[in-house]
């Protein structure tokens, strides 16, 4: 199981590399990686286990964040009511955003990252809606439309696979500048 000590921090070159495409059928090693990436999110979102293992709760975790430069990330966006099914739960492999809305969206509170220990305030403008293509662990291809929060989370994860970190998108001169046609999410 991944712990905070396994999470690579900003400054490590692996976070700035473009990750390698994953070959199918998945090797046993890649299957295990996919399982472990999702396990981290599930465990971290359980308040008791999160405390027990001293984790930071997360909604996404990309392979480069555990030192593996492969096009793979887990995403677990919980439902508002914990008894409902998650809004989005999957390991996305070789993900490609095939279309972006013109409208931008940003999290009202800005973003953080498990690989970035300090707070970096500012809006991270992203697409409000995306169409995402990816392959799951079973080799099944998906093409889905996501909006708002799940769309933002997937863009943050896909950025990791291209060596981009959230603060790269913050306007240094005016971190909280808003543009027209930008929506604020949460
Ligand atoms: C993990 C990040 C991914 C999100 C950041 C903004 C959009 C995607 C992450 C740092 C601390 C908070 C934490 C978070 C959370 C939220 C709701 C419910 C449960 C992946 N990362 N966080 N960022 N936690 N937990 O770096 O999850 O938002 O690349
Ligand atoms: Ni991150």
Image (cartoon, rainbow, N blue to C red):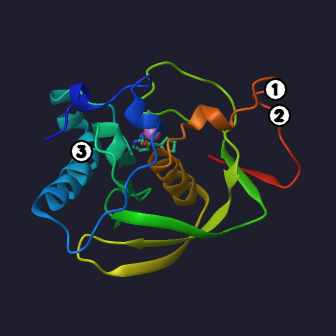
Secondary structure beneath dot 1 equals loop
Answer with the quadrant where ligand 1 appears in the image: top left
Q: Position of residue 64 (x, y in %)?
A: 35, 42
Quick check: marks 2 and 3 in contact, CB under 8 Å? no
Query: Of callouts 2 and 3, which one flags the residue occurring earlier in the amino acid sequence?
Result: 3
Q: Is residue 177 above or below residue 146?
A: above
Indicate the quadrant where residue 21 lies: bottom left
Secondary structure beneath dot 3 equals helix
Can residue 85 be seen at all in this image of the molecule?
Answer: yes
Q: Is residue 43 above or below residue 98?
A: above
Direction from residue 1 to residue 98 in the image, left or right: right
Which residue in the structure is indicated by mark 1?
174
Question: Depth check: 175 or 53 in front?
Answer: 175
Q: Is residue 159 above or below residue 167?
A: below
Quick check: marks 2 and 1 in contact, CB under 8 Å? yes
Q: Residues within 10 Å of mark 3 (few under 14, many from 20)?
A: many
Indicate the quadrant where residue 48 lies: top left
Secondary structure beneath dot 2 equals loop
Which residue in the structure is indicated by mark 3?
40
Residue shown at 85%/55% (left/top)? Answer: 181
Residue situated furthest left in the rendering: 28
Q: Position of residue 182 (x, y in %)?
A: 79, 52
Q: Position of residue 49 (x, y in %)?
A: 17, 37
Q: CA distance from mark 1 to mark 3?
A: 35 Å
Question: Depth check: 177 or 165 in front?
Answer: 165
Q: CA distance from mark 2 to mark 3?
A: 34 Å
Which residue in the structure is indicated by mark 2?
177
Q: Residues within 10 Å of mark 1 (few under 14, many from 20)?
A: few
Q: CA distance from mark 2 to mark 1?
A: 5 Å
Q: Position of residue 82 (x, y in %)?
A: 34, 56
Direction from residue 92 to residue 37 in the image, left or right: left
């Amino acid at each position: 199981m991944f712990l905070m000590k396994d999470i690579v921090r900003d400054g490590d070159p692996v976070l700035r590399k473009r990750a390698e495409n994953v070959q199918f059928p998945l090797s046993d090693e890649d299957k295990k990686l996919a399982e472990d990436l999702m396990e981290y999110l599930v465990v971290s979102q359980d308040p008791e286990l999160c405390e027990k293992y001293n984790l930071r709760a997360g909604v996404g975790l990309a392979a480069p964040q555990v030192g593996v430069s492969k096009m793979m990330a887990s995403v677990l966006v919980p439902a508002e009511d914990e008894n409902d099914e998650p809004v989005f739960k999957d390991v996305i492999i070789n993900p490609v955003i095939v279309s972006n809305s013109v409208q931008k969206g940003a999290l009202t509170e800005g973003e953080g990252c498990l690989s970035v220990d300090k707070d970096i305030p500012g809006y991270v403008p992203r697409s409000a809606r995306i169409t995402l293509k990816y392959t799951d662990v079973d080799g099944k291809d998906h093409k889905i439309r996501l909006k708002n929060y799940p769309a933002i989370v997937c863009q943050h994860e896909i950025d990791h696979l291209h060596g981009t970190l959230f603060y790269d998108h913050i306007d240094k001169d005016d971190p909280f500048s808003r543009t027209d046609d930008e929506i604020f999410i949460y």
